[in-house]
Image (cartoon, rainbow, N blue to C red):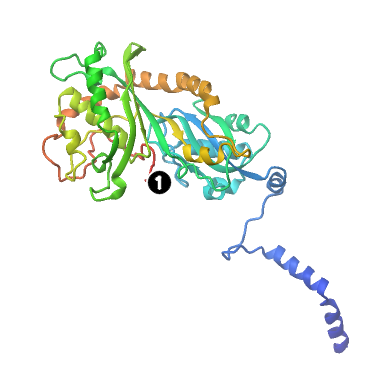
Amino acid sequence: MASLKEENILQASSVGETRKASSLQEDSEIVEENGHDAKRFKPDDEEQAKKYPKKKVVLLLAYSGKGYHGMQRNVGSSQYKTIEDELVQALLLSDCIPENHAEHMKKMSFQRCARTDKGVSAAGQVVSLKIRLIDDTVEKINGHLPSHIRVLGLKRVTGRFNSKNSCDARTYSYTLPTFAFANKDHETQDESFRLSQETLNRVNELLSLYKGTHNFHNFTSQKGPKDPSAKRYIMEMHCEPPFEQGGLELAVIKVKGQSFMMHQIRKMIGLVIAVVKGYAAPSIMERSWGEDKVDIPKAPGLGLVLETVHFEKYNRRFGNDGFHESLDWTEKEGNIEAFKKEHIYPTIIQTEIEEKSMASWLATLSIHDYEASSQQPNDHKVGDAAVDQSDDGGDSD
């Protein structure tokens, strides 16, 4: 009997049976490369994955940042709501990503061009990620987003595309009431102020000094004068002619640079305001790029908007290869402008009227020490938000 049983076992160990048994064992155990048990796909996820395989895309986003603690999501923390919290939830509800991607964003290779500060808005944010290209993808994502956050466009990109690393430059705008430029001793400090051409020229003279490469260690935190990453290249910076809306005279400052550090743009604008108003001497501009620490005020985040992100190198290489589209979004300019007029500009103006954030911040300019070099940390705490991230996340991601 024993020899017969052994013979049967040997017969059952044929090549086909062995492969079958091995297959069954692998199917029951399913071990990942790192040794952890892998989660099985739900049947509906598996079916979706076959029908709509994931593709690398970029999404063009516009949003009003009021009420949000910046762009970047803090997975596992519900204390501070971000724009990415809303976006990921919409991607999940629209079946563009499986459930496990919502908690592990690296699974969809998610990357943003700019993190943007608390309360900062965007008209042309771009994120790259892998999603299922379902039917009417953009419409379905937007169906699960609040009206003040919109996906305005979607384009296929190369498999290794990274929206942050592939971005050559960012353009921001900063909308502010013109009374921010009123001389502290000689002009009215309220809504009745009107910006003269002479003062506008003076503002633009100062803003133009930022163009080129400078050491901006005084315009951010946690970077010393010897840190090579504190050197940034500014391509353009100017203030446009003023206009009236909602009973306020407003002006828009535009700045284009390769990348910006935490709070850099707001401090660049804050320093120019301090000089124009008469709190600081013009010589502080050049001194701020030196090795000594200089006390620089940081303008409110309310008026800051990420306007455009630029992909010149990518467009030259892949924009006309016959497989990929150019990432310039010219065809979406009408949608972008319509969104700004409906959701961004009214929020900036109404919030300024109701909360007077600029007027309140201007009242703190007199407490800064513009003459002596400060040995204290150069990120002044007056008016800082509890949670600030970055103006664009250039190297602070």
The residue located at (56%, 30%) in the rendering is 153
Q: Position of residue 64 (x, y in %)?
A: 44, 27
Image-quadrant location for residue 364? top left
For label 1, the residue is 397
Q: Residues within 10 Å of mark 1 (few under 14, many from 20)?
A: some
- Residue type, label 1: Asp
| Left or right, residue 157 beside residue 183 | right
Q: Is residue 304 in sight in this rendering?
A: no
Image-quadrant location for residue 36? bottom right
Q: Is residue 158 in sight in this rendering?
A: yes
Q: Position of residue 47 (x, y in %)?
A: 72, 46
Q: Secondary structure at mark 1?
A: loop
The residue located at (45%, 34%) in the rendering is 309
Q: Nearer the viewer, residue 372 or 43?
A: 372
The residue located at (51%, 35%) in the rendering is 86
The vertical placement of 290 against 245, above or below, is below
Viewport quadrant of the N terminus: bottom right
Q: Nearer the viewer, residue 66 or 16?
A: 16
